[in-house]
Every structure is written in C-alpha cells, then in structure tokens.
Amino acid sequence: MTTARPLSLRRRHVLGLLTAGAALGSRNRAFALELPAELTQPAAITPGAAFGLFNNIATAGSRLVAVGERGRILLSDDAGHSWRQVPVPVSATLVAARFATPSLGWAVGQMGVILKTRDAGESWTLVLNGIQAAGLMLSEARADNARAPTSAAAQAELLNAQSLVSFGASVPMLAVVPLDAAHILAFGAYGLALESLDGGETWRGNAARVPDPQGLHIYAALRREDALVAVGEQGLLLHGAADGALTAGVSAFQGSLFGVVSPAAGEVLAFGLQGTVLRSSDFGATWRNLKPVSSNAVLCGQVLPDRRIALGDASGNVLVSRDGGASFTAMPGTLPVTAMGLAPDGALVLGSPAGLRRVALGVES
C-alpha cells in the first residue's frame, strides 16, 4: 500500500456488515485535531437498542457481551434470553470484543476505537482512537526505518504508516486478542497492528512483527495456547507464536477471510467470501481448501461444547459441522448472521442487522 486507497464497493459492503457499516501519541495527551462526533458523543441509550446490528458476542465469565452499531454494548446474564444496554463513551460502531478475565476486557471498532472495561462490561473507558493509532504506527515505522534505512520491509512499513495518518480517524480497528491481562494485540484495516504491555493503558505500533507489506485489512485473529492465527483481505493468513513475530501462510484462495475458529489443538478453520473454508492441522503453517459451504460470504463462527462447528453466512444460514469441518448442514435463515456467541447453557446466540436471538439444539428458542 503505497498510496491511500478507497474501499471498493465490495469492501464497503463487507465492512458494513462487520463494522455496520496528525495528533499523535498516547491517550493521556490532549487531542490536537478536531475529532469526529463518533469519538466525542456517547452511544445513545434507547429502548430498541437490542434490535440493531451486532458484530460480535464475547463472554465475560457467564455473562454475554454484545457489541454493535453506533457504540451499542448490551449485556446478558441469563444466557441471552434478555439484554440490557450499558453506557459507552463513543458512538462509533464496534466490531469485536474479548476478555482476558471475567472482568477485564476490550472492545474495538470504527474510528480506530479501543475501549477497556474492568467490571465485566458495566462501564467502558476510551483508551485509543484512530488518529492516535496511526501516529503510533508512524512512530514505529520511523524508528524501524532509522535502524534499517535500506530495508524494503521498513520502507513499505513507513509508506503504509504515512497512508494511515492521511486517513485521520477513519481507519477501523477490527480485532483484539488478549494474550494475558497485560499483553494485548489489536489489528485493523490497512495493516493497522498495535500492541499493549500494560493491559491496554498505552499502546505501540507492532507492524514489524506482522508481515503485511501491502497494508491489507486484518479482519480476525485467534489465540490458542501459545500460538496465534490472523486472517484478512486477499487471503491473508498469518501465524506464529502469540508473543512473537508472525509468518505469512499460503493458500490458493485470494479472497477476503473474515474469521477463524479452532475446534481442537492445532486445528484451525478460516472462512470468508464465496462460502470459502480453509483448514489447517498445524495451527496455520499449512492450509487446504475445503468444499465451499455457501454461495455467500461466511461472516462468523463458533465451536460448540461438543466440538461441533457452527458458521453463519451473509444470507442467514447457520451451517453446522459434526465432522471437524468436512461437511456442513445448513439451518436456513433470512437475515445475515453477523455474530455468534456461546451461552452458558450451550445455546448459540446470533447477531444480525435486526438484533440478537438464541438458537438451541438446531431449533430457534
């Protein structure tokens, strides 16, 4: 990525489903640029909050935490039967959330937002925005360039970071991965890659350890034990030690991959456009294409307690595999399945542009 590139219509559509839709430095510095309203206006508390678009459903102990459009965060303490909205300091659409402990978690989304909670989602603090994130990437790139001025990788990193700064606050953060309560990774569009070593209080650029010279969108990442897999635009596949440098994987699929699940140690399924499912038996080192499971994009997935794999696609189907991904059975639906969570009682909780619902044992409840 040597110049700023607008989102194509396809990417706009996909980011619309996944995200619904310089002043450089840490969060402790005053903003030197005027911020978009989405970063300064809190999410509106509305009676119909549960009926909007939701992009991710995380677990905080036995609690479910759903994040979605316009900064909405909803909590459920009864396995997804009922939901309540909580205050959020931004109205930017939120894309993903993860918890390191039942109380400590982070949510990320549009405008480069990173939010933190210490009380299982009851309250949230804004710790980073897109302008700051781009500045951190640029600072890292300049330092890497100074150390290795003739390195092609360092030069590509610098060009990518300069492009990020030119976007202002508009670049979305798309994935967050706690390695433990202190060490957090975050990924986003156009190669945005950050790291925190103090529980998300301060951040630094992490592009040097994430091989993405084209500045592709990183849509999702998964940590299992001490390994990490990340997937993204144009078939981007990354893997490696969770706290070390990643390596680019290779597959025959060149379309975008939107998510990844791990049904067993070493086993990974990545999924994306055109119903594509890729499988790795060595946690991302090598991949093979499985038979497409849908004619539409697969947007989310979840491993069930009995190791069945459930995927959700853009046409509303819930696709369930009982054989590790070799075959899937479709439960037809009508609305895109944009999020999947696992309730404490084993039921699936699905997000869509029309809200949240439970699915238990293949029957809607």
Image (cartoon, helix red, strand yellow):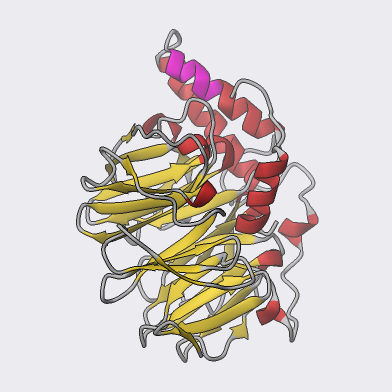
The residue sitting at 58% across, 36% down in the picture is: 190
Which quadrant would the N terminus be assigned to in this image? top right
Residue 288 found in image quarter: top left
Asked if the magenta segment contains residue 28, the reply would be no
Q: Position of residue 142 (x, y in %)?
A: 51, 22
Q: Is 15 on the left or on the right of 237, as rendered?
A: right
| Count of numbered circles on the image | 0
Asked if the magenta segment contains residue 156, the reply would be yes
The residue sitting at 56% across, 90% down in the picture is: 82
The residue sitting at 57% across, 72% down in the picture is: 351
The residue sitting at 45% across, 48% down in the picture is: 276
Q: Position of residue 197 (x, y in %)?
A: 37, 50
Nearer to us in this view, 54 or 194: 54
Instruction: Using the rendered image of the protein, determine whether residue 183 is visible from the camera's viewpoint.
Output: no
**Image: magenta residue range:** 152-158
The prevailing secondary structure element of the residues shown in magenta is helix
Relative vertical location of residue 321 with respect to residue 123 in this rendering, above or below: above
Relative vertical location of residue 321 with respect to residue 269 in this rendering, above or below: below
Relative vertical location of residue 357 with respect to residue 246 in this rendering, above or below: below
Nearer to us in this view, 344 or 98: 344
Instruction: Using the rendered image of the protein, determine whether residue 248 is visible from the camera's viewpoint.
Output: yes
Q: Is 272 on the left or on the right of 308, as rendered?
A: right
Q: Is 291 on the left or on the right of 138, as rendered?
A: left
Q: Position of residue 335 (x, y in %)?
A: 64, 70
Nearer to us in this view, 42 or 9: 9
